[in-house]
Image (cartoon, grey):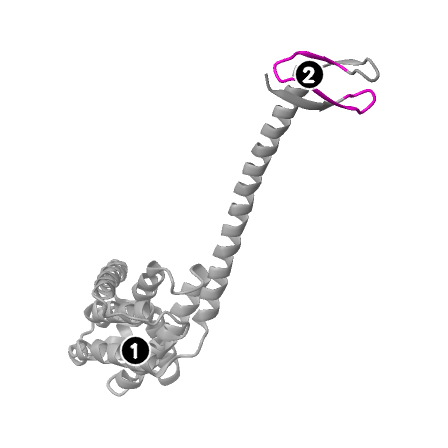
Amino acid sequence: MKLTEYKCPNCGAVLQTEEDGNMAACPYCGAKFAVEREQELTAALVANTETIADELKEVTAAYEEKLRKRAERDADESKMFRRFKIKDIVFLAIITACTLVTSAIMPLLIHVPVFGIIQLGLGLQFSIFPVIGLMKVRKAGSMTIMGILIALFLVMMFPPMALIAVCAVVVELLVFAVFRSYKNDWACVMAGTLYMPLTVPLLWLYYNVNYTVTGEENEAVTMFLGATDPWVIVGMTAAILALCFVGSVIGMVISRELKKAGVFKK
């Protein structure tokens, strides 16, 4: 029979008793005590200790995971503001060139007196390619760089299009207010969706100021000053937004496929 050591609760003497015994008597002081009760308490204490240890491990793991995610988020946010590399600028310039080359119909649209016709005609190009650029170069300022490059070219054909650089800045501010970075693919989609449509209100302001200062009157000015049927304005605005959203999603899908193919590398 296996013996187990216990301490007498009365005098503290070390005793040995059978493991299966219910009662023990101290030969030194004559005190009797329940051995089974002490065994139960010891087992319960061990079980509770193990339970607490497991719970502590879970809490510790959850806290460490939270710290890890916070560190990753902080690292990502700090990366958004790191300097651009030459290859980043080159890639954004190539994307800008693709945008402009596929927008060759713009000179034909400038003289068409229909509200939002320019934005509708360029919506796909000005959403697909910028999104591809943003999903490759996920840094604050990428949209602004593309906007400035596009504006430098378009201003030679249509001076008011210099406002497209302002649109790029506004878009970045809105995206960072919502997503805080371009890490999320849908942040890039948001930028591509809003980029071209934002030129509509800015061009309206331009024409309004231009008309007020110079008194110039022509069909384009009239359209942007509100002479067009309100339903045409609503319909064209909705069409421009929808087209740019579709183009942005296409740009996101293309970028993901390029990444899978290994074309997009860090």
Secondary element at image label 2: helix
Secondary element at image label 1: helix
Q: Which amino acid does label 1 sit on?
A: Leu
Closer to the observer: label 1 or label 2? 2
Q: What residue type is labelled 2?
A: Val
Residue 84 picture location, percent across and down: 39, 79
Residue 27 picture location, percent across and down: 79, 15
Camera-nearest residue between 163 and 63:
63
**Relative horizontal placement of residue 39, taking residue 96 as reference (left or right):** right
Q: What stretch is highlighted in magenta?
A: 8-25
Please identify the quarter of the rendering in which residue 114 is found: bottom left
Camera-nearest residue between 237 and 165:
165
Give above or below for 191 relative to 14.
below
Please identify the quarter of the rendering in which residue 57 is found: top right
**Relative horizontal placement of residue 200, taking residue 5 as reference (left or right):** left
Residue beneath label 1, please? 92
Q: Which residue is drawn at 66% across and 11% down?
A: 22
Residue beneath label 2, please? 35
Q: Which residue is drawn at 79% across and 24% down?
A: 13
Residue 102 picture location, percent across and down: 17, 76
**Relative horizontal placement of residue 205, taking residue 43 as reference (left or right):** left
Please identify the quarter of the rendering in which residue 139 is found: bottom left
Can you say which quadrant of the picture contains the N terminus? top right
Could one spot residue 160 in this view of the protein? no
> Most extreme residue toward the bottom, as rendered?
156
Q: Is residue 141 magenta?
A: no
Q: Which residue is drawn at 48% across and 65% down?
A: 75
Residue 236 picture location, percent across and down: 24, 62
Can you say which quadrant of the picture contains the C terminus? bottom left
- How far apart, in angstroms, are the residues tagged by discs 1 and 2? 80 Å
Mark toward the start of the polypeptide (1 vs 2): 2
